[in-house]
Image: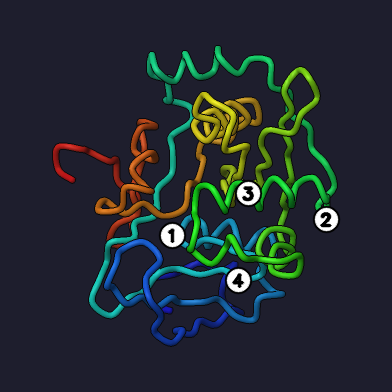
C-alpha cells in the first residue's frame, strides 16, 4: 500500500471491498480498504494503522476508500491541549455521580439489553437495531488488540453507559459507546470527556474518534472537542472550522 511506510506493517496486505450503500450520506456508494490477514493485526500493527487513518470494527481493520467520495476524515483529539468548554464542564458536573468500572471482554446480558434499547431508539431502521447475540459479539467483543470494556453506573447502581476502547501506544481509540437513551444529560459527550481524562492520566497524547463527515449531522459532535486533528493527504493537520 503506497501511502504507508511503516516497518510494523510490511507483512500485511490490503484489499478493496465491493461497493455498498453508504451508511451516512444518502444516495452515496461506499467502499473500504480492509487489512488482511486480520489475525496479524496485533497491538503494535494496529497502533501504526491508527496513525495512518485506519479504524477497527470487530476483527476488521479498515479505511474508507470510495470511488467518487472522500467525505470520511479520520480525526483525533489533542488530549494534552484540550480544555472543556463551559457546556462540557456542565455535562461533567451533571454526571459526577457516574462511576466507571472495567469488566471482562465477554458477553453480559445487561449490556446487550442496553445496546438493543439504544439502537432501537437512536438508530431505528439502520440494521443494527435488529442484531442478535452473534452479530453483537462479532462487532464489539471480538478483538486481537488491547481492548477494554468499561461500564458506567449511576449512584443507584443502574447501568447507564457501556464503552469499548482500544489502548494504543500513543492514545486511546474510541471504538463504540452506547448508553441509556432515556437518561438525560448528553451521555455520549460525557463519555468522550471521560476518555480524554483517561488519556491525560495515562500520558497518552491522542484520543482517536474514528471518522468525521462534514455533511453528516450524526458526526457533528466530534468537532466540538478541540483542538482536534484531521488526517488529510496522509498527514495529520489541525482542524480549522473557518477552512472546513
Judged left or right of residue 190, residue 168 is right
2 vs 1, front mark: 2
Judged left or right of residue 80, residue 98 is right
4 vs 1, front mark: 4
2 vs 3, front mark: 2
Q: Where 80 falls versus 32 (above or below)?
A: above
- For image coordinates 38% across by 18% down, the residue present is 85
Quadrant, the N terminus = bottom left
**Marks 4 and 1, how far apart at CA:** 14 Å
Q: Earlier in the sequence, mark 1 or mark 3?
A: 1
Please name whichever residue, 72 or 136, is drawn nearer the observer in this view of the structure.
136
Query: Label 3 neighbourhood size at 10 Å, few (<14), some (14-19), many (20+)?
Result: many
**Marks 2 and 3, how far apart at CA:** 23 Å
**Marks 3 and 4, how far apart at CA:** 16 Å
**Marks 2 and 4, how far apart at CA:** 19 Å
Q: Earlier in the sequence, mark 2 or mark 3?
A: 2
Q: Which residue is mark 2?
A: 107
2 vs 4, front mark: 2
Does dot 4 land on a helix, a strand or a loop? strand
The answer to whether residue 198 is visible is: yes
Does dot 1 land on a helix, a strand or a loop? loop
Picture coordinates of residue 225, whole percent (x, y)? 39, 32
Q: Which residue is mark 1?
A: 53
Q: Earlier in the sequence, mark 3 or mark 4?
A: 4
Q: Which residue is mark 4?
A: 60
The answer to whether residue 167 is visible is: no
- For image coordinates 51% across by 77% down, the residue present is 34
- For image coordinates 72% across by 23% down, the residue present is 154
Q: Which residue is mark 3?
A: 168
Q: Where 236 falls versus 130 (above or below)?
A: above
| Callout 4 touching callout 1 (CB < 8 Å) | no
Amino acid at each position: 500500500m503506497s501511502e504507508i511506510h511503516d516497518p510494523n506493517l510490511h507483512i500485511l496486505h490490503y484489499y478493496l471491498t465491493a461497493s455498498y450503500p453508504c451508511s451516512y450520506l444518502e444516495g452515496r456508494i461506499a467502499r473500504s480498504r480492509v487489512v488482511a490477514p486480520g489475525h496479524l493485526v496485533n497491538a503494535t500493527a494496529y497502533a501504526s494503522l491508527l496513525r495512518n487513518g485506519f479504524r477497527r470494527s470487530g476483527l476488521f481493520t479498515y479505511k474508507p476508500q470510495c470511488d467518487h467520495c472522500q467525505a470520511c476524515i479520520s480525526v483525533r483529539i489533542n488530549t494534552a491541549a484540550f480544555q472543556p468548554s463551559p457546556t462540557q464542564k456542565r455535562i461533567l458536573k451533571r454526571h459526577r455521580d457516574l462511576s466507571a468500572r472495567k469488566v471482562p471482554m465477554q458477553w453480559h446480558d445487561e449490556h446487550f439489553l442496553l445496546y438493543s434499547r439504544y439502537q432501537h431508539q437512536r438508530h431505528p431502521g439502520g440494521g443494527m437495531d435488529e442484531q442478535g447475540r452473534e452479530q453483537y459479539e462479532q462487532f464489539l467483543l471480538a478483538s486481537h488488540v488491547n481492548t477494554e470494556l468499561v461500564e458506567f453506573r449511576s449512584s443507584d447502581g443502574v447501568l447507564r453507559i457501556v464503552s469499548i476502547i482500544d489502548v494504543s501506544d500513543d492514545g486511546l481509540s474510541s471504538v463504540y459507546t452506547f448508553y441509556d437513551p432515556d437518561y438525560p444529560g448528553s451521555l455520549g459527550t460525557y463519555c468522550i470527556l471521560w476518555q480524554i481524562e483517561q488519556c491525560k492520566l495515562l500520558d497518552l497524547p491522542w484520543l482517536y474518534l474514528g471518522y468525521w463527515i462534514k455533511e453528516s449531522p450524526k458526526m457533528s459532535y466530534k468537532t466540538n472537542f478541540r483542538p482536534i486533528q484531521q488526517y488529510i493527504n496522509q498527514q495529520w493537520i489541525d482542524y480549522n472550522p473557518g477552512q472546513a
